[in-house]
Amino acid sequence: MSNAYDFPGGIYPPERKQRSNRSALTEAPLPSRVILTLQQHSGQAATPCVAPGDTVKVGSVIAKREGMISSDLHASISGMVSEVNATQISIEGDGQDEWLRLPPLAWQYVEPHALLERLNDSGIVGLGGAGFPTHIKARVVERHAINTLVINAAECEPYITVDDLTLRHHANEVLEGAQIIAKLCGAQHIIIGIEDNKPEAIEALKHALSNSQPISIELKVIATRYPSGGERQLIKRLLNLNVPSGGLPADVGVLCHNPGTLLAILHAVRDGQPLVSRVVTLTGEAISQPGNRWVRLGTSVRELLEQAGLNTPELHQVIQGGPMMGTPLLTLDAPVTKLTNCLIAATIEELPPPPAESPCIRCGECESVCPVALLPQQLHWYARAQDDAKLERYHLFDCIECGACSYVCPSHIPLVVDYREAKSRLRLQRIETAKAEHAKHRFEFRQARLAREEAEKQARKEARQAQQRRPSNTIAASSEKVDLRGLRIAHAAAKASVKKAEKTLARVAQEDPKQSLDDFEMQLATAQENLKAAELQLAQAREQQSSEESS
Amino acid sequence: MSMMRASGVKDAMTATSVPPTASLMRWVIAATLPGIATMSYFFGLGVISNVVIAAVFGVALEAAVLWLRKRPIRVTLNDSSALLTGVLLGASLPPASPWWLIGVGMIAAIVVAKQLYGGLGHNPFNPAMVGYALLLVSFPTYMTLWAPPQALIPNGLWAQIAGTLPTAQLDSLSGATPLDAFKHKGEAVLASEFWATNPLPDGTLSAWRWVALAWLAGGVLLLVKRVISWHIPIAMLGSVLLLATLFYLSDPSHFASPLFHLLTGATLFGAFFIATDPVSAATSQRGKLIYGAGIGALIIIIRTVGGYPDAVAFAVLLMNLCVPLLDLYSVPRPTGHPNTSSGERP
Ligand code: SF4
Ligand code: SF4
């Protein structure tokens, strides 16, 4: 069914990339006001660490990451914080554009942990659309040997030209970013996958390849077909490896990054510049100056589109992302986030509303284009019937929501909508069934926190007593024989369970980015509390022992 | 991302490669025209009047049931599927069948087999074949008598409207189809002897061949236009040829030749126009191959061993019965699943 070096199915939708790839990449004007949402990444929302009235510079941290799968957020303009609420932070600009940068790092010479810390401090997340925190993704080496880094420049969705323009203008830097990640995760090979509809970017890459050090990079140009840019599909086409169902590319020794993310990584490391802007494709027939812009995060979509010559009466809808997988924006006042790769201001002729749906006639067209070799018609049937056992049996969670099936369906059934709904219903159910478990974990967390606080209290008390005792060595201390060995073992075990909880969390978060992570974050926090308590006890015992020996 | 992928979002781009469902149906109707035209050339205007009466019944019955079910009538009729069912059943019946016969068949097809199950997309059985099978079982005399070729203006048109059988057709020998005649030649008679008696009116065999080729032409049009996929017709014709060849080689003196099976009766019509009804067929590509091959095998088995001269309707209905099972056991292995899990247990 699946040939070597290819995935099954696939479609050839009209590309419509010429609209935005014919002008150079430019800077959008500095916005006078930005709104930064606290959730611009997968995982948990960040927690604000500024208050209204605070002055910030570009790059000041305004919200800290919360839990493990989360990301810091930085001010994208300099000025004053005007509002902080549960979901977003607004900043009024002073027009000065004053920066606060971290010290530059020479990535060739610094330790991996310093690089990881820099990625963490810079708020870098995957810019291809998923928004997974890069520092977590880079820690994959703790659990998997990574052999190959894949640069995913396929950019198979119609309209979007972000990677294309990023590579035309910054090929050298993207490759340097790739070298950083390769060093960090120990990859021996770097391979770029790009579709053949981007000749200029390919040319730029060819020039840049020879300069790239120390790992030589392979460029693979593949025929254009949707959805080649899907992680699994690209890995299949480039390396002929099948990422296991429910697994990660890391399971076959591969890590995928998109060019924009690699560029952001380089900026963070080499220039100490946190993630405060990104490249956005502005396109669609309802704007007169389409193209790609460097946009500060938090800029309003309306402002951007108006600067690009928005023709409001012609505008039918604005789609964020591509036409296949993107979502219509409900309001033009939405801000640009780390996840906004493309804004399509479409006229009604351009992307008309889909015709009325008719019943599925089981023609099997959808099946023949599915890149995962699923049976979309059966999934559709069972999704509507809410037959969950059958949905699992027909591998609903293997669906990558690429929309190829909806695209060809002669009955115009919005199949992907069905699948998304079914998936979120099943996810909710899983949370429901795990509720008792969750309560147990919450209880365990509270216990662990109390134990840690107790240990701290004990430590303070001992310290006080020790000070009082020191002049005249007491027998009491030595009578209480310290079980140093037992404590050391407990400490090691606590450390291991933190590692394990981290591993589980990272895996779950990557396997299904839309899943709720609360429970896993809670288990990690519990393990961390336990570790802290064990550390305190161990330190205390060591102290005691050494004071005994010295006396 | 979860916040961005809110549900209830309409997909922004829609198909261009495959014609939409309503026009798929219309393409099938268009592709029946060569077959219908050739049949009427050989068997008279009674073919066309059959088709017209059945189509009118189809649309009227569908509208009536939709009205009773309080469903939108115009939108649904627009998918042309009831019209198609009428055309297919009309083309299957002996020319100039009585109007009430056609009516009974269409009630079975549209009301029972289709709408009672929930309408287009929900019917487990091929509606036209349900109608046909019901008529064959209930009114065998009416169903097995075909007017001899060359009666372009049949005296039977009036009889059709009056609801009786045309007198000319009551002569049973002249009204037999080749399959029928061959079936009833009797065990003792060798095939060569049978043909030597010149059992059919002049031109009957060649008429049936021309009709079969006309259906083939329509079928090829459907394949080229990507209205149907190749899986079912190819699997079905393949298995017809294979089994017929095996029987023939085992005893050429008693069994009909593979070509006879292919070019007489409803084999080609069935392969391209009946078995390919997607709603009642297996849905996966693997399932379709098994489904088609099963129909072909059943056709030959019923024709040679069973009690009915032709067998397309029964073969299709029997395989319709197997579709839930086929669908369950022909789930393809998605990418990323290890080989061993293929054909997973339910
Ligand atoms: S393409 Fe549409 S109509 Fe055809 S089988 Fe798939 S869901 Fe049904
Ligand atoms: S959306 Fe899912 S089911 Fe449809 S083609 Fe893509 S992967 Fe297959």
Image (cartoon, grey):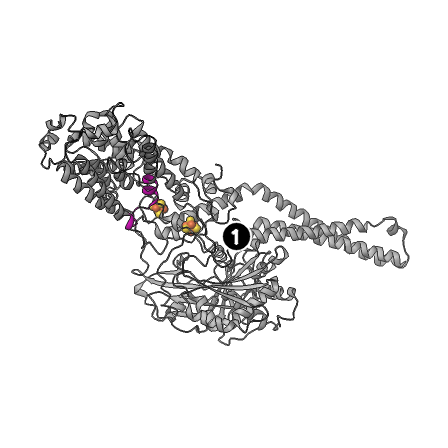
Q: Is residue A195 above or below residue B287?
A: below
Residue B22 percent location from the top left of the image? 26, 47
Q: Which residues are magenta?
A: B223-237
Dot 1 falls on a residue whose secondary structure is: loop
Q: Residue at x 22, y 28 (%)?
A: B194
Residue B305 percent location from the top left of the image? 31, 27
Of residues B329 and A88, which is closer to you in this image? B329
Evaluate whether residue A275 shows in this view: no
Q: Chain of mark 1?
A: A
Left/right of residue B148 with respect to residue B106 in the rendered view? left
Q: Residues within 10 Å of mark 1 (few under 14, many from 20)?
A: many
Q: Which residue is mark 1?
A: A243
Of residues B144 and B12, which is closer to you in this image? B144
Left/right of residue A142 with respect to residue B116 in the rendered view? right
Q: Is residue A82 above or below residue B108?
A: below
Q: Residue at x 15, y 29 (%)?
A: B174
The furthest residue to the bottom: A96
